[in-house]
Image: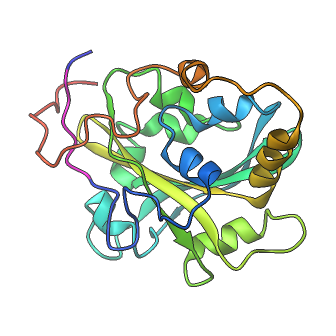
Amino acid sequence: MRAMLIRFDAADAHWRVAPLAAFSADQKDWLTRGGSLTAHLRALGHVAVRVTREAVDMPWPDEYAALGLAPRARAWVREIVLEVDGVPFVAAHSVTPIAASHGIWQAMRRLRTRPLAELLYTDSGVARSALVSRRVSARHPLHALAARETQGHVPHVFVARRSVFERYGAPLLVTECMLPALWARLACLAGDAQPAVPAHVAHSARERGPLGHTASRAAHSPLPPTSSRR
């Protein structure tokens, strides 16, 4: 695979590369895992994708800069829930410029219930920014998205991560909010009387590939012209 630079950055004053010190060990782990989140969830059970919304809409206020869009520009938005054994574990929000949704990222419109990972981790032309994370309170629209999928008590804050995928100069911003059921499942597994999996074994089991690192070729230099490539 050829070396690639990415000119989009998912970080800002709130979304940060280093997870907050107050996050638990499990939260820090899952917020920084590279590769496909869907693949990681499959280690916990059967994963299904439930599409909750696909529409032309305006990005969230903190997404314009990450996408390199002008204020009030429209975009294609896809929102889904990743369920493990029928229980919502992750609420995800993906957004790309309208032009890209009809061009370089047009396959995103045809995914239906297939995971976005099918587009991102099989294409050597895709580069990924660093993963960034934050706490999400009710002030952020992601909180309402996650609250709708939370069974029982809705927490005051959720934890989420995001990154920008770039393909031939077109950005796709993917935000993933971890739901309480995920942390509950991990706590339950940690309490089982099972032998601990050695760290090097657990790491090697994670999905490998061109985007298998937390920050895949993240940089801030423009890509060389690639308009002729598809």
User: Residue 169: x and y, percent?
Assistant: 23, 41
Q: Is residue 55 shown above or below 71?
A: above
Q: Is residue 40 shown above or below 220?
A: above
What secondary structure do most residues of the magenta stretch adopt?
A: loop
Residue 4 is a magenta residue: yes
Horizontal side of 126 relative to 120 (left or right) equals left
The type of colouring in the image is rainbow
Q: Is residue 53 shown above or below 219?
A: below
> Measuring 19% from the left and 23% from the top, which residue is drawn there?
3
Q: Quadrant of residue 230?
A: top left
Q: Quadrant of residue 223?
A: top left
User: Residue 88: x and y, percent?
Assistant: 80, 51
Tally of numbered tags? 0
Front residue of 3/230: it is 3
Residue 57 is a magenta residue: no
The residue positioned farthest toward the top in the image shown: 1
> Measuring 57% from the left and 24% from the top, which residue is drawn there?
206
User: Residue 56: x and y, percent?
Assistant: 51, 61
> Measuring 38% from the left and 62% from the top, which residue is drawn there?
16
User: Residue 25: x and y, percent?
Assistant: 60, 51
Horizontal side of 45 relative to 161 (left or right) equals right
Q: Is residue 81 shown above or below 107?
A: below
Horizontal side of 221 relative to 178 (left or right) equals left
Q: Quadrant of residue 225?
A: top left
Magenta residue span: 3-8
The residue positioned farthest toward the bottom in the image shown: 139
Q: Quadrant of the N terminus?
A: top left
